[in-house]
Image (tube, rainbow, N blue to C red):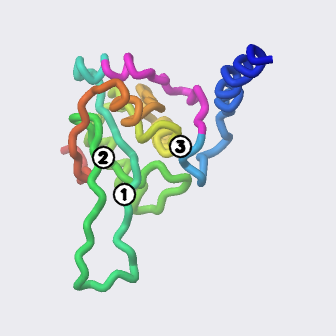
């Protein structure tokens, strides 16, 4: 009986993390939930492949973790401290670009940022990430594919997986994109 209980306990996490199908469209809330093992058209990276690309400087790393907005009811004279973001060193942070839907302004920001980060090359390798079990990076990577980028890489473990390996994180600021000349 104890052996059967142990076997069940060992298989339960595997059952809870069963393959999640890719949705037909962008995923909405809740964004922190198990993600698929795949993204059609993209390469999915594990920790070691992501680290190898980062170490070699062979890809642009794009963090899409959202940034909390200043509460609209906060008095203008009250100080607002933004939550800092620690990310993979050298990554660009494009907050709020992994939501299910983007406003026109957010889409322009995302498109311009990718054009700048890729130096205008649609075949520039770009690694999209956020946190583990976060659909934001899946959505952003899918969006990059739909824009026409051909070397889209998705790192679903994100900064959680990176930090769990003991690899460094660095403070980043929201990236301000400008179009390449």
Q: Residue furthest right?
A: 1
Between 40 and 149, the residue placed more toward the observer is 40
What residue sits right under mark 1 in the picture? 67
Q: Please tell me which residue is depicted at 53% across the width and 43% down the height of the picture.
A: 135
Q: Assess whether residue 48 is covered by the magenta stretch.
A: yes
Between 87 and 11, the residue placed more toward the observer is 11
Of the residues under marks 2 and 1, which one precedes in the sequence?
Answer: 1
Whether residue 147 is visible, yes or no, is no
Q: Please tell me which residue is depicted at 34% across the width and 39% down the height of the picture.
A: 62
Q: Which residues are magenta?
A: 34-51
Neighbour tally class for label 3: few under 14, some 14-19, many 20 plus, Cα within 10 Å: many
Picture quadrant where residue 71 is located = bottom left
What residue sits right under mark 2 in the picture? 93
Asked if disc 2 and disc 1 are in contact, CB closer than 8 Å, the reply is yes
Residue 34 percent location from the top left of the image: 60, 37
Relative to 45, does residue 130 appear above or below in the rendering? below
Whether residue 139 is visible, yes or no, is yes
The answer to whether residue 138 is left or right of residue 122 is right
For the residues labelled 3 and 1, the Cα–Cα distance comes to 15 Å
């Amino acid at each position: 009986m104890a052996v059967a209980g142990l076997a069940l306990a060992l298989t339960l996490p595997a059952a809870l993390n069963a393959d999640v199908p890719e949705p037909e469209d962008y995923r909405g809330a809740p964004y922190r939930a198990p993600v698929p093992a795949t993204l059609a058209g993209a390469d999915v990276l594990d920790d070691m492949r992501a680290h190898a690309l980062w170490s070699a400087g062979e890809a642009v790393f794009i963090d899409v973790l959202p940034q909390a907005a200043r509460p609209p009811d906060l008095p203008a004279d009250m100080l607002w401290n933004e939550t800092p973001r620690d990310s993979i060193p050298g990554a660009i942070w494009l907050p709020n670009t992994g939501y299910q839907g983007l406003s026109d302004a957010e889409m322009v920001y995302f498109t311009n940022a990718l054009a700048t980060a890729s130096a205008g090359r649609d075949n520039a390798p770009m690694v999209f990430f956020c946190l583990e079990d976060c659909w934001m990076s899946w959505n952003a990577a899918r969006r990059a594919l739909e824009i026409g980028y051909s070397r889209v890489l998705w790192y679903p473990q994100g900064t959680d997986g990176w930090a769990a390996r003991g690899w460094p994180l660095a403070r980043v600021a929201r990236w301000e994109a400008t179009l390449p000349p």
